[in-house]
Amino acid sequence: MDFDRRQVTCPQSETSAGWHGPYPTSSPTSAPLIVARFTKSQCRPCPVRTRCTTTTDSARTVGFPPRELRDLQLRVRAEQQTPEWQARYAVRSGVEGTINELAHGHGHAPLPLPGTAESPPTARVHSHRREHRAPQPTPPTGEAPPSRPPTAFQNFLDQHGIPRPRSWRSARD
């Protein structure tokens, strides 16, 4: 990407024919995107086209954030490779994994943080409802309990023929 010349060069040394934006995205929390376009005459005869784009009737477009955001993205990604960052993230990952397990594996929603919109009495009501909810019916003797739908990761393993051991999480309480 050459922000000064406003063009992108593909791995086959073709230079983009258009540079447009930045455009706002559909999500208010997403960054704006710049779109660079290549022409059909550049993309159709390309020997590595199938590795670049799946479209059969059009040319390749590339979307990316403005220079300031792209530079920040590259700097943060480089920082994430350092041992210091990975050690800090390991703690966060463990905490988030535990919360996720409670929320999705056992049906518990995390309680709100102090000072957030949900008041403590409301939080206590939700907690009370969880603790006193009707028990799930048990299947007849000899039948397996109903299984949970597979996660995205389990679907990925299945699609690629990678065996996955049956986990205690596969059966719902």
Image (cartoon, rainbow, N blue to C red):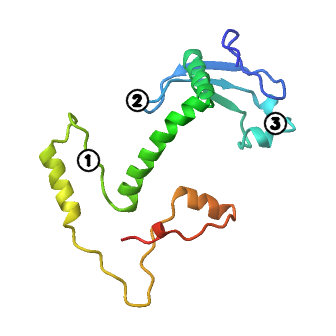
Give the number of the disc on residue 28.
Answer: 2
Quick check: 3 left or right of 118? right
Q: Position of residue 86 (x, y in %)?
A: 56, 35
Label 1 sits on a secondary structure element that is loop
* Disc 3 + disc 2, Cβ < 8 Å: no
* Whole-percent x, y for residue 173 in the image: 36, 71
Residue at coordinates 33% horizontally, 60% vertically from top-left? Answer: 107
Mark 3 crowdedness (10 Å alpha carbons): few <14, some 14-19, many ≥20: some
> Residue at the location (30% across, 53% down)?
109
Secondary structure found at label 3:
loop
* Quarter-of-image position of residue 17: top right
Distance (Cα) linking label 3 and label 1:
55 Å
Q: Tell me how far mark 1 sits from mark 2, CA to CA.
A: 26 Å
Q: Which residue is mark 3?
A: 44
Q: Nearer the viewer, residue 111 or 11?
A: 111
Q: Residues within 10 Å of mark 2 (few under 14, many from 20)?
A: few
Q: Nearer the viewer, residue 111 or 43?
A: 111
- Please, is residue 141 above or below residue 100 in the view? below
Give, as a three-letter code, the residue at label 1: Leu
- Identify residue for label 1: 111
Counting residues from the N terminus, which is met first, the one under dot 3 or under dot 2? 2
Task: Name the mark nearer the viewer: 3 or 2.
Answer: 2
Amino acid type, residue under disc 3 in the picture: Arg
